Amino acid sequence: MSKFPWKTTLADSALLAATAYAFAQMSSSGPMGMHGPIQGDMMNQMHSQMMQGQGGMHGGMGMQGGMSGHGGMQGQQSTATGTPTMPGQDAFGTIQEIVQILQSDPKTDWSKVNIDALRQHLIDMNEVTLHAAAAQRMIDNGIEIIVTGDGRTLEAIKRMVPAHVNELHEIGWTAKSEDQPNGVKLTVLASEAQPLTKLKALGFMGVMVQGVHHQPHHLMIAMGQFDMHQPR
Ligand SMILES: [Cu+2]
């Protein structure tokens, strides 16, 4: 597994840590809250807590020395001189957060928990995000992207891109994927809400990050309720 370089950036880590904070807050109401109509509320709560979390983060990144000129900010830097929050690696932090959520919920069914499935999905995300090749061209009123890779990257492309097309349909986008020998052809059509200029600018990853399904899906994968590796 050492062949996967776990690249990360400070910005990604900050967002991840902020999300981790939000999930930690959510876990008090239990992960079963992800289902049904309370999801909207939960997303709002998560968003506001992410904002708070991000405020706190800046102190955790060793910036307190430079913050002295910002007056009122000082009072909010509760983590400035406290416990470090960065997990060191984004997938590590994601798994750590999920395990903490599961451990803090007495209803967790450990006979179904599958952390390795989550790890495999995070490897897929790493491959698709960092290692897949994406050749984009304009078509009539849309973009077509040939996404290719070898070995583990190819496996990840074939799992993630078609699954993401289903998620795009859920949020009202017109998209399709077609299997190819060394990858997948992803086609996204423009609409009033998603004009061609925007699609062209978004490109492969800009399209792949649409929606907020990964966070709840990661918990479901870990709970053994959502197997990314089985055809759905
Ligand atoms: Cu994911």
Image (spheres, rainbow, N blue to C red):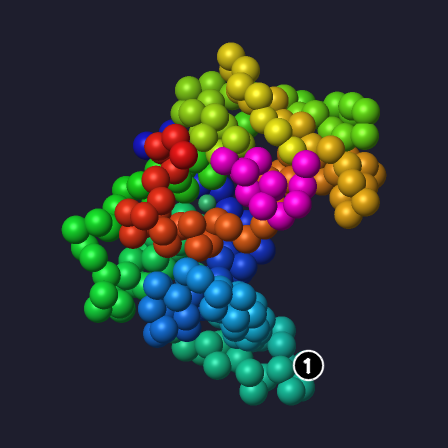
Q: Which of the 4 quarters of the picture holds residue 140?
A: top right
Pick the front one: 154 or 57? 154
Residue 88 visible, this orientation? no
Q: Is residue 133 above or below residue 12?
A: above
Image check: 142 left or right of 35? right
- The mark tally for this picture is 1
Pick the front one: 175 or 75? 175
Image check: 63 left or right of 202? left
User: Can you give x and y, in whole percent of width and height, for residue 81 in the image?
Assistant: 45, 78
Q: List the single residue furthest toward the front.
A: 37
Q: Residue at x 35, y 63 (%)?
A: 32
The secondary element bearing badge 1 is classed as helix
User: Can you give x and y, in whole percent of width and height, for residue 203 in the image?
Assistant: 70, 35
Residue type for callout 1: Gly
Q: Residue at x 43, y 25 (%)?
A: 155
**Residue on which disc 1 sits:** 69
Image: magenta residue range: 163-174
Q: Residue at x 56, y 70 (%)?
A: 44
**Is residue 38 inside the magenta stretch?**
no
User: Can you give x and y, in whole percent of width and height, for residue 108 in the image?
Assistant: 23, 61
